[in-house]
Amino acid sequence: GFLYMSQHTLNQGSQFNFNEYAGFGFHFFLKKNLACTAEYRFRHLSNCDIKKPNRGINSGFGIVGLCYVF
């Protein structure tokens, strides 16, 4: 998708950017209605060469949590 950042950065020549992301994860059910969740997400942000510079900003992060199903 596309987005507009209010933050000025040296890596991006424009505040109008595009966001691509990918990830994977799993649920491990501890009980019938309770699961442990683990995920990894990677995100890339760049202005698609609309304006120089276009170095891009990459981030990766992990998530761990519990999921209760009603």
Image (tube, grey):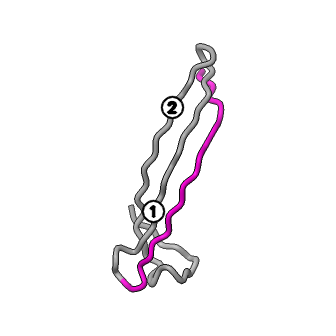
Residue at the spot x=37%, y=84% of the render?
51
40 lies left or right of 53: right
How packed is label 2: few (under 14 Cα within 10 Å), some, or many (20 or more)? few
**Residue matched to label 2:** 26
Identify the image quadrant of the N terminus.
bottom left
Question: Against 47, is 58 above or below?
Answer: above
What's the magenta bit mostly, secondary-structure-wise?
Answer: strand
Quadrant in the rendering for residue 67: top right
Q: Which residues are the magenta region? A: 51-70
**Residue matched to label 1:** 44
Question: Against 67, is 60 above or below?
Answer: below
How packed is label 1: few (under 14 Cα within 10 Å), some, or many (20 or more)? some
Query: Which residue reaches farthest top?
Result: 32
Quadrant in the rendering for residue 50: bottom left
Q: Give the amino acid type for the residue marked by disc 2 in the picture.
A: Phe
Cα distance, mark 1 to mark 2? 22 Å
Q: Give the label on residue 20, or none.
A: none
Question: Against 2, is 70 above or below?
Answer: above
Would residue 68 be counted in the magenta stretch?
yes
Query: How far from the left and from the top, in percent, is residue 46?
Result: 42, 71
Could you tell which of marks 1 and 2 lies nearer the N-terminus?
A: 2
In the depicted view, which residue is nearer to us: 32 or 69?
32
Residue at the spot x=61%, y=43% of the render?
63
Residue at the spot x=48%, y=53% of the render?
42
Numbered disc 1: secondary structure: strand
Query: Which residue reaches farthest left?
Result: 49
